[in-house]
Image (cartoon, rainbow, N blue to C red):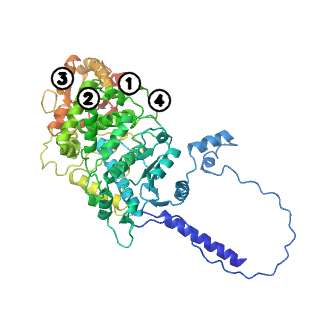
Amino acid sequence: MRALSFFFALLATLASAATLQSNATSFLSTPLFGQIGIPTIPFPKIPELPKIPEPPAIPQPPSPPPHPFETKAWQRVTGVKNPTYQEFEQARQEEPEQETLEETIAKLLDEFGSNARFGVTEHFIFIYDTTNYFAQWVALICERVETTYEKYVRYMGIGQTELDEPMVVLIFTNKQDYEAYATKNFTEYASLKNKPIGFYSSAKNRIALYDLTESDKTKVEDFTQKRTLEEVATEILSQPKGMETLSVIVHETTHMVSYNRGMFGRTSKNPTWALEGLAMLFEAPVGEIKDGGWNVTYDFEANRARIREFQQYAKSTTENALRRVITSETINGDVPGSYEISWALFSYLYKKYPRRLARYLYATAGMQPRDSYPVNERAAEFEECFTSDYDKLYKELCAFVDELEKNPELFMAAPPQEEKKGKNAENGKKEGEKKGEEQADKSDDANKEDVKQDEPNKESASGKDAEKNAEKEDKQREDPQSKSVDKPKEPSKPVVSEPKKQDAPTIVLEGVALDGSVFNWSKYSGKYVLVCFWASWNKASAEEISRLVALYDKYHDVGLEIVGYSLDDDVDTLKKFVADYNVQWTTLSQSLSTAKKYEDMADRYNAYSLPKTTLVGKDGKALETNLRGAELEEKLKELFPEQ
């Protein structure tokens, strides 16, 4: 009996070791392990022992069944005396038991099929039956998409959530197995007439794709020679459908990351044109083949394939389908023009109006989940942020795409906000501390020790420090085991945070006023100032400006000042609006200011939801943020009781 016990203990130890080894698998640096299994060991012959008569059985009282509530959910209600079943069920649903990584992998392997293997990277689990080399290349591209997405949302000023669990990618060798799996498991895929060659299911939260290049039939799996990333990527991408495969991987991974990182809600209604447009923005192949074929560092290339598709579509019809696409709940290959317009519109807005696009995403996708998203609501939200003149917008789109076709390198221009980062921020801070002085000089000498003011969801360093931080972050992505690099903390919610009240930040404005003069913030020292970020194209802003005109007339003579910062792109339209509404206070123009290389104040103070107001005290520090309507009037009565 002892020999048997020892043998089974040995088997258990081997199984445990195999599980631990599989948990550490990372195929960005090492070969993958196959399915978890226990090696065959010859069964030793055990001599028979003399039989010993068993003692008479002693009746034992029946043991109580295990308590069904010994779980995390039960622990949450242990403080309740005699919790009911309903209370337990509610707690269990609020915090369901989470399976281990090993359990997740085991289920996926069983679901995939008998030939399945697996690999685990920092953010993904890969289940596949293709070659190891092809799977490693897919993993490399997926991780780079995740890293690029983090840089993208930082540039756009949009927060992101932490991942609750690894993202799952299923890689099939052939089209037949892929289609059979997707049809069976993805309801959205099964309903499509034109089947895509790769698919992300938001309901299942996983990607399925297959190897279009048929690299399993080539020599890339030859383990007799060591193959570099350059050799593998070159061989894969040189296949007839190599670049198409790359685009599919990037497109579907962008969907998965943007859903899991909180830009779009997996269980909510979203602006579908935007989520498809974002994926197509990412899919342009940037980088050298020797580097894997896709490695975005700052900005994206023009998507030449999408340029041709849009131009062909535009020539094939006289219909302006912009509004139809913007208000559509489904964007897929079954709807003519839907992909072409979604790509052109998102790319155009990203290059020309990135901050306004960020506000749109914040207002539509970054808010609370919604069960319904009717057509009129989709249209109203788009028109409030951009325009209702769809004919003019469509002409601008066509001109934008035609220009890209002639000069595709224009799309690679560095984002203007990135160029301005780190300049003038510290000058502005010092200006707040020296309330009676003139605005600080913005020369190179004055900027040598610039440090960008702390902002939520932004990098805190400026200039060379920002570049060093970016290098550290890239190094951490490439080497997750490195302990010498501090991993930056990300915000816990997928929204743009407001400055904390208790921080009482010093507010300093700089830029160019609507009349073309350089704004002097110091002349407002020792006064109460209401700073309002707004835009004439935003309906809520127009209503707020009407109320502020009345409040300015009432309180200006007793000490209230108002300074506006307009996000209008068209200065002539802004001037007409200011004249029509009889706005008497100073209005700064974002367009004029950034053209003169002043930092974007909307970016500095996170004005992503318009209008945004900040009441500044006599000491230059923020007293209240987003006071509007009755609340603002009550505060002004408190500050100016004599009025």
Query: In the rendered image, which residue does mark 4 sit on?
Result: 372
The amino acid type, in three-letter code, at marker 1 is: Glu
**Residue at mark 2 to residue at mark 3: CA–CA distance:** 25 Å
Instruction: Provide residue 437's location: percent of width, then percent of height.
Output: 15, 38
Sequence order check: which comes first, mark 4 or mark 3? 4
Query: In the rendered image, which residue does mark 1 sit on?
Result: 631
Disc 4 to disc 3: CB gap under 8 Å: no
Q: Is residue 426 visible?
A: no
The residue tagged with tag 3: helix, strand or loop?
helix
Extreme-right residue of the structure: 56
Instruction: Provide residue 358's location: percent of width, then percent of height.
Output: 31, 37
Which tag is nearer the camera, tag 4 or tag 3? 4
Q: Residue at x 21, y 54 (%)?
A: 464
Q: Is residue 329 left or right of residue 80?
A: left
Query: In the rendered image, which residue does mark 3 sit on?
Result: 575
Disc 2 to disc 3: CB gap under 8 Å: no
Q: Residues within 10 Å of mark 2 (few under 14, many from 20)?
A: some
